[in-house]
Image (cartoon, coloured by chain):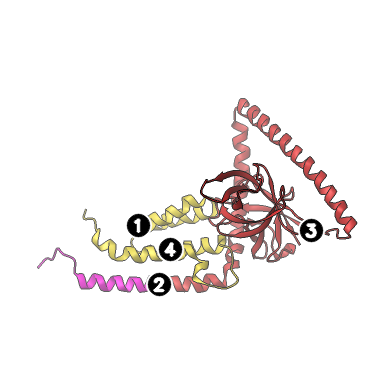
Chain colours: A yellow, B red
Amino acid sequence: MNPRILYSVLIFLGLVAFPWWLYIPLIIIGTLIFPFFVEGILFSFIIDAAYHPLQESVSFLDFPLALAISLLILFLLPLREHIRIHA
Amino acid sequence: MKTNYLQRNKSTRSNFKNAIIVIAVFILGFLIFSIFKTRVLFSLSPLWNLKQTVLNESSDLVSFFRSKNALIDENRFLKQQLLSQQSLLVSYNALNQNYTTLLKDLGQLPKEVKIAAGVITTPPQSIYDVLIIDAGKDKGVFNGSQVILPFGALIGSVTGISEKTSQITLYSSYGIKTEAILERTQTPVTLTGQGGGNYMIRVPRDIEVIKGDRILSPGLNPRILATIEDISAVSTDSFKRVQAQIPGGIYQIRFVYILK
């Protein structure tokens, strides 16, 4: 099985059954290990939608984790080129 | 000719394209999840229920294989805890009875309708100090309803609701401010949520505060919000930092009542 899919399944199980200090690092590690890990943004949206208190007005700050993970992926895009590892 | 260096323009262009995709995914996700936020609660509830069932079954299995000594120790610990809770309950009931009599005299007896609900997820599973309970619109829960523990402590309010589940934001969520009263001195204070069932209060130095004091909600029918756990004072500060906690903590909450 594709390790990326397996990892995504692990994150999904984590957000349903495990504490946040387990599934949040999993998402962060996923963005570091896998290039262009947009699945991480999707999982962050699910976490924010399930656990973040609903506000009266809708804003990007309703999804702080998704925003943080998106910014992390954006930050890693150019950085990844410079830290390319040659086997 | 073989090149063994990065083609800078190509990688910059590809990065730019990927950045646009990430931004598009975020905006799309924001729009979809803003509209269908309550559907997420609804969709995840069967999985949370399944997790709860598995946990209950596995805890039964674990206790079956545990040693006799461990069970005796646990039994002793639970008996002690029960005794301390019973003594608390006795004092609480006595106070409550006095209060009810007082309110009856004033002609303002509260009429409460409560909905019982089981807790599906508690912190630390939820990252933002929220509880998910198994009662929703089907049981008549509505947004803004206050939530209390079985022994009466006020812990939060309903902030999200779906057909069969609801989201409760605890007053102890980080940054949430709640007006309250120190029972001993009847001083109004503001509780600031610190997460994990903890509150922080700043009270003037000359106000007497003792560990174990109760903090109540304001109004004619006050409820216990927290008990004082720790007091610290710096000689240069005219205020004391008081740490308070939801009685019993939030990690063991199994059932709650929602006030209609």
Mark 3: amino acid: Leu
Mark 1: amino acid: Leu
Mark 2: amino acid: Ile
Comparing A37 with B34, the one in front is: B34
Splitting the image into 4 quarters, where does residue B17 fall?
Answer: bottom left
Disc 1 is placed on an element classified as helix
Splitting the image into 4 quarters, where does residue B230 fall?
Answer: top right
Question: Same chain for marks 3 and 2?
Answer: yes
Is residue A1 visible to us here?
no
**Which residue is tagged 2?**
B23
What residue is drawn where x is 68% and y is 34%? B78
Point out the stretch of residues depicted in magenta.
Answer: B1-23
Marks 3,1: beta carbons within 8 A: no
**Which residue is tagged 3?**
B220
Q: Give the CA distance from mark 3 to mark 1.
A: 55 Å
**Which residue is tagged 1?**
A32
Indicate which disc residue A68 carries: 4
